[in-house]
Image (tube, rainbow, N blue to C red):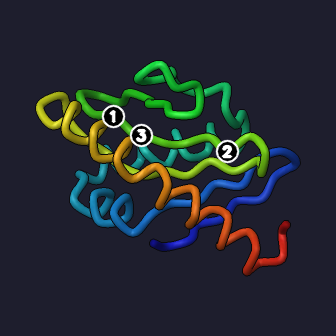
């Protein structure tokens, strides 16, 4: 997993390697939209997007016909961008993220620990 950190007063935003790979396959216009969403997450934190699967910390933000999925770790003031999908692959993407929640949490904790942020 790659680290992308934007520090502000409240949240840090990280991205996974999988997110970065999916991002690279987007069109130029879609990349601009995703970067705008990442900036919103940086500026507004967990107020962006809507919760998924009955989990307040698992959220999505729609752009065009696609979705950006991210996890909110309020205790650490971290948002982790984990995946991008279209409507066709939406449920498979959501299921995969839910299966990998413990891996994502471990990644966030270890990253914060290694950077001496906790």
Q: Nearer the viewer, mark 1 or mark 2?
A: 2
Q: Position of residue 49 (x, y in %)?
A: 52, 25
- Considering the image in quadrants, where does the C terminus appear? bottom right
- Judged by depth in the image, the label closer to the viewer, 3 or 2, is 2
Q: Name the spot of residue 95 as percent of width and height, x first.
A: 27, 38
Q: Which image quarter: residue 5?
A: bottom right
Give the numbered dot on residue 73.
Answer: 2
Q: Are marks 3 and 1 in contact (CB under 8 Å)?
A: yes
Q: Give me the C-alpha separation between circle 3 and circle 1.
A: 6 Å
Q: Quadrant of the N terminus?
A: bottom left
Q: Which residue is mark 1?
A: 67
Relative placement, left or right, of 24 versus 6 is left
Tag 1, which secondary structure? strand
Q: Residue at x 37, y 64 (%)?
A: 20
Q: Nearer the viewer, residue 106 or 92?
A: 106
- Position of residue 74 relative to residue 100, above or below, is above
Say which of 18 and 97 sits in front: 97
Q: Which residue is mark 3?
A: 69
**Image coordinates for residue 19, horizontal then vertical, percent:** 37, 58
> Marks 1 and 2, how far apart in space?
19 Å
SS category of the residue bearing label 2: strand
Q: Depth check: 37 or 19 in front?
A: 19
Residue lying at 43% horizontally and 24% vertically, measured from the top left: 52
- Residue at horizontal 49%, vertical 42%? 70
Residue 74: where, in percent of width, then height? Answer: 74, 40
Q: Which mark is residue 2?
A: none
């Amino acid at each position: 997993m790659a680290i992308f950190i934007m520090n502000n007063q409240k949240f840090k935003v990280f991205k996974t390697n999988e997110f970065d790979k999916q991002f690279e396959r987007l069109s130029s216009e879609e990349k601009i939209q995703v970067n705008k969403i990442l900036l919103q997450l940086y500026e507004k934190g967990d107020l962006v997007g809507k919760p998924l699967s009955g989990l307040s910390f698992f959220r999505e933000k729609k752009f065009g016909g696609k979705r950006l999925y991210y996890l909110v770790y309020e205790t650490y003031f971290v948002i982790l961008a984990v995946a991008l999908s279209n409507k066709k692959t939406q449920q498979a993407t959501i299921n995969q993220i839910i299966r990998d929640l413990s891996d994502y949490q471990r990644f966030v904790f270890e990253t914060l620990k290694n950077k001496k942020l906790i």
